[in-house]
Image (cartoon, rainbow, N blue to C red):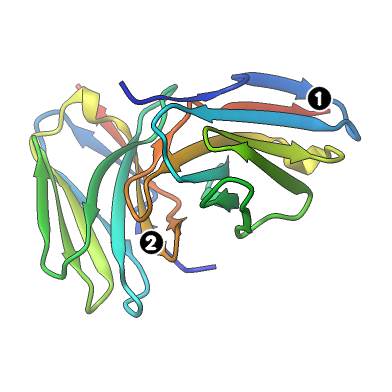
Amino acid sequence: DVKVTQSSRYLVKRTGEKVFLECVQDMDHENMFWYRQDPGLGLRLIYFSYDVKMKEKGDIPEGYSVSREKKERFSLILESASTNQTSMYLCASSPPFNEQFFGPGTRLTVL
Amino acid sequence: ILNVEQSPQSLHVQEGDSTNFTCSFPSSNFYALHWYRWETAKSPEALFVMTLNGDEKKKGRISATLNTKEGYSYLYIKGSQPEDSATYLCAFLNDYKLSFGAGTTVTVRA
């Protein structure tokens, strides 16, 4: 059974904190993605990676960075969390040009 | 940012009725269109990956059609059941990445 896991389902942080969201997939997929989902806006791509140590900016990368040191793990970093980063964060993985498999999501609240 | 639009934003369907809704996307540089179903408290799951103009795909009571020349896709649910209640997302593949529509939320009333 294919699996994408995320480190936390719910997270509460304070403004200015550094936040790490971890994503692990067990399908040996080359591509990994980080999205955020806000009401009425659908899924918006923050960053993606098509190989180890490779990263590409998505549509809304400001305020975020990523790390992919191993093929199975893709981390999203909020360098200094702000209240407008309160959102649902979804990780996904896929083979190239194929359907994406999503994790359960992390609902982050920044106070 | 590619413009992918879905309509309606939400709809309510009586159990047993059929329904359909639309995804529109850029008609140039088409590679693929994805449909995902996102049930409450679960992860989005892929329904269809469509690549050819005129494609029609089916999974149980759910089917989808694709018109790449005019840039739209329809998703159909036949004989809706309560378990069909979900948000249905379409996404346009460009390079390695998907651009998602905002989704159509379907609520099936028993």
Give the residue drawn at x 34%, y 26%: A2
Quadrant containing the N terminus of chain B is bottom right
Q: From this viewpoint, which residue is outermost toward the right?
A: A16
Determine if residue B78 is in view: yes
Instruction: Kindly identify which numbered label has been placed on residue A27.
Output: none
Residues B84 and A4: in front is: A4
Label 2 crowd bin: few (<14), some (14–19), many (20+), radius 10 Å: many
The residue shown at (47%, 39%) is: A92
Residue A27 percent location from the top left of the image: 39, 31
Please identify, in this view, whether the residue under mark 2 or under mark 1 is nearer the observer: 2
The label on residue B93 is 2
Determine which residue is flagged by label 1: A13
Q: Residues within 10 Å of mark 1 (few under 14, many from 20)?
A: some
Nearest the camera: A22 or B63?
A22
- In this orientation, which residue lies closer to the viewer: A6 or B56? A6
Q: Chain of mark 1?
A: A
Measured Cα–Cα span from mark 2 to mark 1: 34 Å
A40 versus B27 height, above or below: above
Amino acid under label 1? Lys
Please state the horizontal and vertical placement of residue B101, each as a whole percent of the image. 42, 55
For label 2, the SS is strand
Task: Give amino acid for label 2.
Answer: Leu
Q: Residue at x 87, y 39 (%)?
A: A80
Number of numbered discs present? 2
| A95 on left or right of B12 | right
Q: Chain of mark 2?
A: B
The answer to whether any part of residue A41 appears in the image is: no
Q: Quadrant of residue B12?
A: top left
Is the C-beta separation of discs 2 and 1 under 8 Å? no
Residue A109's x, y, as percent? 73, 28
